[in-house]
Image: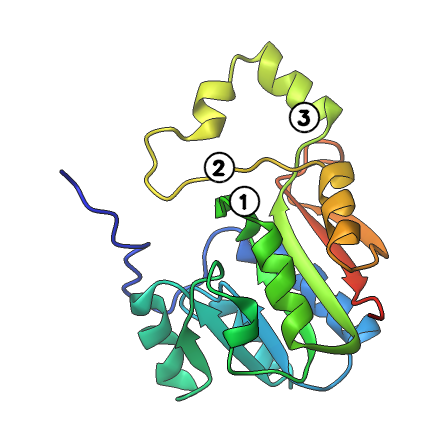
Amino acid sequence: MKKAVGFQYRNPDPGGAQGYIFPILRQILQERGNRGKILDIGCGNGSVARQLEREGFEVWGCEWDPAGVRIANQGFPGRFMVWNVNDPADQFPWGGFGSVISCEVIEHLFLPRNFFRLARRVLVPDGLLILTTPYHGYLKNLVLSILNKWDWHHHVAHDGGHIKFFSVRTLQKMMQEEGFTMDGWQGAGRFPGLWKSMILWGKKKAN
């Protein structure tokens, strides 16, 4: 029986979604974040972190796949560690981050609320949270149905694929229930209403 062994990162190259997500991510950080440390939850091979470092940000990261962490640490030794987001958040060894980012990660999690609990654990008061995930809304869902593309879209043969499918409304609701404001969102990639991804941002609420 084939054993799941992670995403098998082999190089530091960025993923396909990074091209249309990164410009928006950078703009939000520049306009709404602070110049404190950033934690990238689900950092993969560190490709987003490397781009942000070139923009002058200080980025740390955690990732469940050891292969990705090894590659990420080649550029910034000690800044990236293996961590499963389902492990108890209060045991996470780092903290004091001004911002948390997470790109195309939450759709892979059986227990996405654990992601928000980790983000709250590490953020300073009023810290910024930015996360991205594939977009779902009425028009896109309708087009998928008309074109009979749901089998393709759900990627059932893709090990490690997407298991959660969010709309803006459902993700906003979860953010707010887990102690965050939802201050804005923006679609990314493709055409309005048929976006590939959505980017949501908000702040950690006071306890």
| First of labels 1, 3 by sequence position | 1
Q: Given contact means CB atoms under 8 Å apart, are the residues at marks 1 and 2 in contact?
A: yes
State the image quarter where residue 127 is shown: bottom right
Q: From this viewpoint, is residue 50 visible?
A: no
Q: Position of residue 183 (x, y in %)?
A: 86, 57
Q: Amino acid at mark 1?
A: Glu
Q: Examine the rendered structure and indicate whether residue 93 appears above or below residue 167.
A: below
Q: From this viewpoint, is residue 4 visible?
A: yes
Q: Examine the rendered structure and indicate whether residue 69 appears above or below residue 145.
A: below
Q: Residue at x 83, y 66 (%)?
A: 205
User: 130 or 81: which is nearer to us?
Assistant: 81
> What is the quadrant of the N terminus in the image?
top left
Q: Which mark, by number, is residue 6? A: none
**Left/right of residue 150 with respect to residue 120 in the rendered view:** left
Disc 1 and disc 3: Cα gap in Å?
Answer: 17 Å
Q: Secondary structure at mark 1?
A: helix
Q: Position of residue 144 (x, y in %)?
A: 59, 19
What's the colour scheme?
rainbow
Q: Position of residue 41 (x, y in %)?
A: 54, 66
| First of labels 3, 2 by sequence position | 3
Q: Amino acid at mark 3?
A: Lys
Q: Residue at x 37, y 69 (%)?
A: 12
Q: Residue at x 47, y 28 (%)?
A: 154
Q: Secondary structure at mark 2?
A: loop
Q: Secondary structure at mark 3?
A: helix
Q: Amino acid at mark 2?
A: Ile
Disc 3 and disc 2: Cα gap in Å?
Answer: 18 Å
Residue located beneath label 3 in the image: 140
Is the residue marked by circle 2 packed among few (<14), some (14-19), or many (20+) residues within 10 Å?
Answer: few
Residue located beneath label 2 in the image: 163
Q: Which mark, by number, is residue 107? A: 1
